[in-house]
Amino acid sequence: MFAEKMVELGSRRSTIREIFEFGNKRATEVGRDNIFDFSLGNPNVPAPQTVSDEIVRLVTTEDAAALHGYTSAQGDAVVRSQIAESINRTHGTHFTGDNLYMTVGAAASLCVCFKALAEEGDEFIAFAPYFPEYKVFVEGTGAKLQVVPADIDSFQINFDAFETLLNPKTKAVIVNSPNNPSGVVYSEETILKLTALLKERSEEYGHPIYLISDEPYREIAFDGVKVPYLTEYYDNTFVCYSYSKSLSMPGERIGYVVVPGEMEDFKAAYAAVCGAGRVLGYVCAPALFQRVAASCAGQTSDISVYRKNRDILYNELTRMGYTCVKPEGAFYLFPRSLEPDANAFCEKAKSLDLLLVPGDDFACPGHVRIAYCVKTEMIERSLAAFEKLAQMYR
Ligand code: PLP
């Protein structure tokens, strides 16, 4: 009677949500201060004051009917050109508003790109560890998601495995840097190798293999690390951006897709993005937050909080004997679990009210994700529990 796949998707609980809800229940029993919840990627740093100021300014000075009205499907023209100028200032690109399509956050940016590209029999490739929704979104279009196993020593790309998965059915490759859940930033060397291989294979197969760059964490990068802007390396790149993390407003649902003018058959590509947004019923991105995003483009919430949290956790955990690739961005740490079964390890952690997410959810068993977008003071209090957990394995 109902679409079986939808019933299944809607009934299956997300592990992360389940852990988060367990934490809330435990908090009522033992007190919030005794729960160390590292499960959710919800930014804890507030949006910059300019976001609130701009909301107030807009709602108190602008004509309400226009402010809250529909915009054109691809987004308000002035908003798109302001954001394009901001990207150009930061990355030396040459976009105009016509290269941008405003969306309801990165999830929608991705869905729109997948839908714009997917045809019968197509395959998309993601690199483990990867954001689990990719599989849901890609399969929702009828296409197949192929997953390249992780290079667990660096969390850069496992090129040997990648090369064997590329084939004439490959439509697009998804990259996410800074990465959720590893926190790793793909080096320029990785990007050069990746784009050279994609150019070679596109030529061999006689059709482009698109690159989809999922980058909600672009600005959350530490110690001056360079996060290459992929359209500068590969013309057939869709950039899927979101203000959820950079401006700490995930609930407001605002982001965009960039379709560079250099993309093969640009007009058709941009039309396909618009068509996909139409089929998916997005109508237009939230009008008020299009305006807020345009005014605040280029700003971020206080990223230094995440760097401080990263430093404390990485230094303390590695001192205790945990093995972890040092994250250079996002707000996640992805250490190895102290036993091969990350689920069993997370259960032991849970007995200490330490809530971690098993790496299996990100196609990377033997690891756990620690979302450190939490209060620094909670991290400091959690260290004794991490130490007790390590002691269980000594
Ligand atoms: N991509 C990655 C890698 C993410 O971690 C997230 C959210 O956590 C998203 C996409 C979705 O972001 P948004 O809230 O902007 O839809």
Image (cartoon, rainbow, N blue to C red):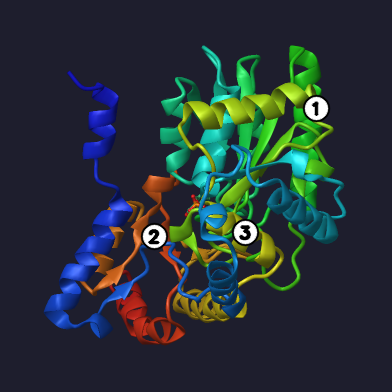
Direction from residue 248 to residue 22 in the image, left or right: left
Q: Earlier in the sequence, mark 2 or mark 1?
A: 1
- Answer yes or no: is residue 209 visible: no
The kind of residue on which mark 3 rests is Arg
Query: Residue drawn 55% across and 27% down?
Result: 276
- The label shown at residue 199 is 1
C-alpha gap between disc 3 and disc 1 = 37 Å
Q: Earlier in the sequence, mark 3 or mark 1?
A: 1
Q: Are marks 3 and 1 in contact (CB under 8 Å)?
A: no
The kind of residue on which mark 2 rests is Ser
Query: Residue drawn 63% across and 66% down?
Result: 220
The quarter of the picture where residue 74 lies is top right
Q: Which residue is mark 2?
A: 337
Query: Residue drawn 81% across and 55% down?
Result: 85
Q: Earlier in the sequence, mark 3 or mark 2?
A: 3
**Mark 3: few, some, or many residues within 10 Å (few <14, many ≥20)?**
many
112 over 244 or under it: above or below: above
C-alpha gap between disc 3 and disc 2 = 44 Å
Tell me the SS state at disc 1. helix
Residue depth check, mark 3 versus mark 1: number of the one nearer the observer: 3
Direction from residue 25 to residue 108 in the image, left or right: right
The kind of residue on which mark 1 rests is Lys
* Image coordinates for residue 199, horizontal then vertical, percent: 80, 27
Compare residues 149 and 293 and report the one nearer the observer: 293
- The label shown at residue 291 is 3
Tell me the SS state at disc 3. helix
* Image coordinates for residue 64, horizontal then vertical, percent: 52, 60
Direction from residue 151 to residue 366 in the image, left or right: left
